[in-house]
Image: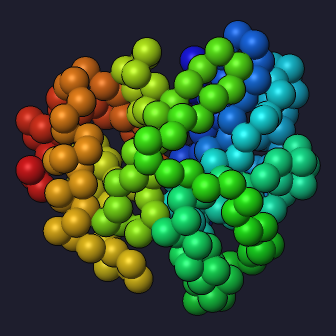
C-alpha cells in the first residue's frame, strides 16, 4: 500500500489517499477547503489513474471533513464513520460559523466503522481500532503488513490530540493510546492528522505525555 499526504485548509490538516497496485484507493479525512485544494486532490487521483472506492473519516471535527461533500459527490461515495461521532458530525456547521469559515454540509455517514472490522480495497486490508479521547468516535486504521497506521488526531510527533473540545476526555485519550496503540510493535509508522509522521518507538521514548 502507498500513502500520499496532502496538507489542507486553515488548520493545516493532513488528508490521505491510500492505494495499491490495483489502483483502487480510499480517501481519508478530506480536508480540502477550496477549489484549488480540491483540484490538487483530484489531479493526483486522475494522474495516477486511481479509482476511489471508499471515503473514510477518522473522526468528524470540521478540519477533517471540509471536503466530505465534494468527494462524496465527485466520486459517488458513501461516507464511513464510527457511530459514536455522529453528534460531532452534526455540530460541524456551528463550528465552522464560530471560526468564520465556509462549509458545505457533509452527508451523513451511511456505513459504520467499528472496531474489529476490516476495511478492504484492492489487495489491501486495514484493521479498525476505536481510540476515543480526542473525539468520542475516533478511529485509527492499521496496515499490519506494512507496519503503519493512519492515526488522525490521536497521536502526534511529541504530542497528543487536544481534549478541550466537546466529547474530549484527556484521561481516556491517554489510556486509549497506551492500551490500543502502544501494544503494537514499536516500528509502526504513524501518519498523523497534523504535522509530520512519527513512530510508536519515538513517542514511547520521547513524548512528554508518556
Could you say which is closer to the camera, residue 182 or residue 158? 182
Reply above or below: 9 against 105.
above
Q: In the shown orientation, is residue 150 left or right of residue 108?
A: left
The structure residue drawn at horizontal position 64% and vertical position 48%, both measured from the top left corner, is 56
Q: In this image, 126 relative to 123: left or right?
A: left
Image location of residue 17, percent across then percent down:
65, 34
Of residue 197 and residue 19, the one placed in the foreground of this image is 19
Q: Is residue 104 visible?
A: yes
Q: Residue 121's spot in the image, x, y percent? A: 68, 26
Q: What number of labels is visible?
A: 0
**Which quarter of the image is occupied by the N terminus?**
top right
Q: Outermost residue toward the front?
A: 116
In the image, residue 170 sits, relative to residue 93, either above or below, namely above
Q: Residue at x 56, y 79 (%)?
A: 87
Q: Quadrant of residue 132?
A: bottom left
Closest to the observer, 5 or 89: 89
Residue 139 lies left or right of residue 133; in this view the side is right
Residue appearing at x 46%, y 25% in the figure: 143
Residue 44 drawn at (x, y percent): 78, 30
> Is residue 99 in sight in this rendering?
no
View extreme (top): residue: 21
**How is the model colour-coded?**
rainbow
Which residue does the image show at 31% across and 49% down from the upper left? 155
Q: Is residue 121 left or right of residue 163?
A: right
Amino acid at each position: 500500500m502507498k500513502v500520499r499526504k496532502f496538507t489542507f485548509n486553515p488548520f493545516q490538516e493532513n488528508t490521505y489517499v491510500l492505494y495499491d497496485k490495483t489502483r483502487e484507493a480510499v480517501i481519508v479525512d478530506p480536508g480540502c477547503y477550496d477549489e484549488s485544494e480540491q483540484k490538487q486532490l483530484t489531479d493526483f487521483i486522475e494522474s495516477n489513474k486511481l479509482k476511489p472506492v471508499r471515503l473514510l473519516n477518522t473522526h468528524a471535527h470540521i478540519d477533517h471533513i471540509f471536503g466530505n461533500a465534494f468527494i462524496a459527490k465527485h466520486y459517488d461515495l458513501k461516507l464511513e464513520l464510527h457511530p459514536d461521532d455522529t453528534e460531532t458530525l452534526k455540530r460541524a456547521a456551528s463550528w465552522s460559523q464560530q471560526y468564520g469559515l465556509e462549509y458545505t454540509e457533509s452527508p451523513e455517514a451511511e456505513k459504520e466503522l467499528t472496531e474489529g472490522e476490516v476495511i478492504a480495497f484492492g489487495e489491501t486490508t486495514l484493521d479498525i481500532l476505536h481510540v476515543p479521547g480526542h473525539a468520542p468516535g475516533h478511529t485509527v486504521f492499521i496496515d499490519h503488513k506494512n507496519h503503519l497506521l493512519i492515526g488522525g488526531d490521536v497521536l502526534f510527533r511529541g504530542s497528543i490530540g487536544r481534549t478541550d473540545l466537546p466529547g474530549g476526555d484527556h484521561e481516556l485519550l491517554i489510556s486509549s493510546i497506551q492500551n490500543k496503540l502502544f501494544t503494537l510493535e514499536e516500528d509502526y509508522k504513524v501518519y498523523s492528522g497534523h504535522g509530520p509522521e512519527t513512530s510508536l518507538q519515538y513517542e514511547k521514548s520521547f513524548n512528554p505525555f508518556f
